[in-house]
Image (spheres, rainbow, N blue to C red):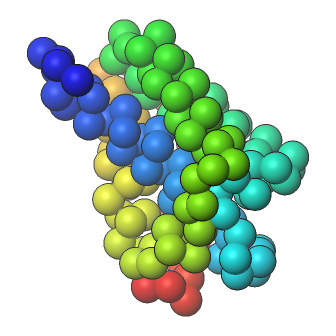
Amino acid sequence: MLTDDLKHVEQLKLFLLNLGHTFLAERWLLDARPQDETVYHAMQDPALRNELEAVWMDEVIPVFEAQGKREDALAYLDEVRDRFMNPFLHHRIADIAQNHGQKKQRRIVPLLELATSLAAGRGTWIPQARLRLATKTGSAQG
């Protein structure tokens, strides 16, 4: 991929793909979901998928919208959904959950900080209750 805006591409991956994985791992840990569950299988659970979709649409996409990059983010999110729904990718959530606390700090906290910064400049708050809660929960996976 060639781009003039590497930071934007990095944000897409970090805040949509990586954060999506981290959110699924958070739910997997908190809900004591099956040890062998994959991303694909997690996405087959309507309640969990709806919760992840709400995080993306209500808490992540508005950050890209505030930067004038909503359409790019939605297009990338379509690719992420395709990846998460691919039955041939056996990406185990147990593997994703390794070093979970550190991953939350690298994947969720920067989004919250960016949203706060953008809100200060625009005077419009972006609600992010699910992600804020995820940064406050502990896990046995470090």
Residue 30 image position (x, y, % from top left): 70, 75
Residue 62 vs residue 45: left or right?
left
Q: Is residue 88 visible?
A: yes
Q: Residue at x 37, y 32 (%)?
A: 12
Residue 54 vs residue 132: left or right?
right
Q: Residue at x 51, y 59 (%)?
A: 22
Residue 76 vs residue 3: left or right?
right
User: Looking at the rendering, in which quadrant would you find the C terminus?
Assistant: bottom left
Query: Which residue is the extreme one toward the bottom?
Result: 140
User: Looking at the rendering, in which quadrant would you find the N terminus?
Assistant: top left
Residue 7 vs residue 86: left or right?
left
Q: Residue at x 82, y 49 (%)?
A: 44
Residue 50, compared with residue 38, is above or below; it is above
The part of the image, by quadrant, that contains residue 55 is: top right
Residue 109 image position (x, y, % from top left): 37, 54
Residue 77 or 56: which is nearer the viewer?
77
Residue 13 image position (x, y, % from top left): 37, 39
Residue 17 or 133: which is nearer the viewer?
17
